[in-house]
Image (cartoon, rainbow, N blue to C red):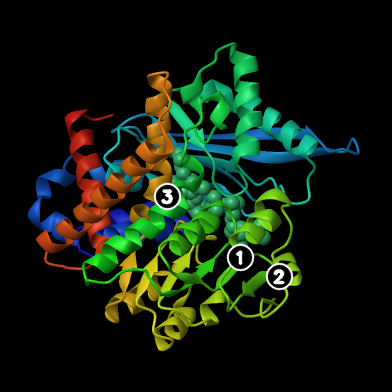
Amino acid sequence: MHENLIPIRQAVIARNPGESEFHQAVDEVFESLGPVVARHPDLLESAILERICEPERQIIFRVPWTDDNGQVHINRGFRVEFNSALGPYKGGLRFHPSVYLGIVKFLGFEQIFKNSLTGMPIGGGKGGSDFDPSGRSDAEIMRFCQSFMTELYRHIGEYTDVPAGDIGVGGREIGYLFGQYKRITNRYESGVLTGKGLAWGGSLVRTEATGYGTVMFAEEMLKTRGQDMDGREIIVSGSGNVAIYAVERAQSLGAKVLTASDSSGYVMDPDGIDLDLLKQVKEVERARISQYAERKGGRARFISDGSVWDVPGSVALPCATQNELNGRQAKKLLANGVEVVAEGANMPTTAEAIRLFQDADVLFAPGKAANAGGVATSALEMQQNASRDSWTFDYTQQRLQEIMRGIHHRCAETADEYGMPGNYVAGANITGFIKVARAMSAQGLI
Ligand code: NDP
Ligand code: 2IT
């Protein structure tokens, strides 16, 4: 890390004790900014980096709700409004028992640079709750969402802060959240949330966008080596929104996807994942991934110990959660001949694993570049809402494709310009940072 950045980094750690995921996200960005400090010292004036690491606003609130047996539960709700230099705060809501301030801040911090990279007018934010939705009835999910929004509504708005989904928050939850926002405010303010249903202000392609975009980014990286996805064996982790549509896009390009996983284990299907069955088990029934192997039969297997990264393939797409691919697993993937790693999830690869991939000349795409298709399509949803219009699937997908190509181009070009060709991590962090820093400078000391 550049010596001028070390004291700033130390101050961030001291100021935010115990938030290891946030520290990790800050370190990854700071490690990339050395060449910027050397070339554009002016960009770091008026404590830009110190300011960028301090959220503009952090909201923590109580979320009381009643389960189907009449028992009362109390959860904690969060919204971290990190940076609004480029537009209203934008980023998802995560409902998962592991959520605490450090997770929300790592996600919000990443979101600043990701959103900047998309080229769309959106700032960075993130929120969520330590609520565990697994095993809860629709009625319980609805009551939780209504209680969550009863506090959140006063902080958000189409020009202020626009939440969307993330782990544990999909179309069903966005529906309940939107309904409660509308009821409290008496405003049909479509642009206050994204990821809405198609009949009430949602955008075509938003459901597919993160997974499709991740594979589009992998295709762009492969193109730089004159290669493509056709005929490749792909290893995917996760089986939620991002994973499912990464599988769909990879298969449409002639690749064979061998794996999918959830927190109970993974399935390995040598004949290629049956996408309809995966959607039925995970999207429709919200069942455990073992159901896939049970119903598929044949050579499909459910494995509860070990990880998807034990399975050989030339492309790895981590699409579940943070720090799900460590150094040991990276070595295994390398021994098995991995050539491309594109992060569908946020920060799924540990710092050690990233270094191993980069040292081995693997094409490695960080989440803030590779998974930006989701939030970019959210920004397209906001555009459609603002103009009271709705676009076709083909047109929206074409816009997504152009955005992903643009992100790839900017990352690759910046990495070249700063003398680190092929380093998409540096390319993404530097490009994302410079745009936000310039906007913050222009807007004065706020
Ligand atoms: P979903 O809730 O749809 O799916 C999450 C998947 O990851 C599930 O298979 C889940 O398994 C697994 N998972 C979650 N937490 C853990 C954990 N602690 N350990 C093991 N497995 C886990 O979420 P998404 O697909 O939307 O999100 C996946 C990743 O992609 C996240 O990192 C998210 O931040 C990121 N992302 C999402 C975007 C979006 O538009 N949705 C956009 C950009 C990034 P189980 O069901 O067993 O918990
Ligand atoms: O991590 C992410 O980019 C998301 N969860 C999507 C955010 C959004 O506002 O669509």
Cα–Cα gap, marks 1 and 2: 8 Å
As rendered, which of 353 and 409 lies closer to the eye?
409
Q: Which residue is mark 2?
A: 296
Say which element carries label 3.
Answer: helix
Query: Considering only order in the chain, which callout, 2 or 3, is on the residue closer to the N terminus?
Result: 3
Q: Residue placed at 54% from the left, 60% from the top?
A: 320
| Residue 291 image point, x, y percent | 74, 65
**What residue did someone put label 1 on?**
274
Please give the residue where the numbered disc 3 appears in the rendered image.
Answer: 15
* Label 2 Cα crowd, 10 Å radius (few <14 / some 14-19 / many 20+): some
Amino acid type at mark 3: Arg
Label 2, secondary structure: give it. helix
Q: Name the secondary structure under disc 1.
A: loop
The residues bearing labels 3 and 2 have C-alpha atoms spaced at a distance of: 51 Å
Q: Which mark is residue 337?
A: none
Residue 18 visible somewhere in the drawing? no
Check the image and report above or below for 207 versus 28. above
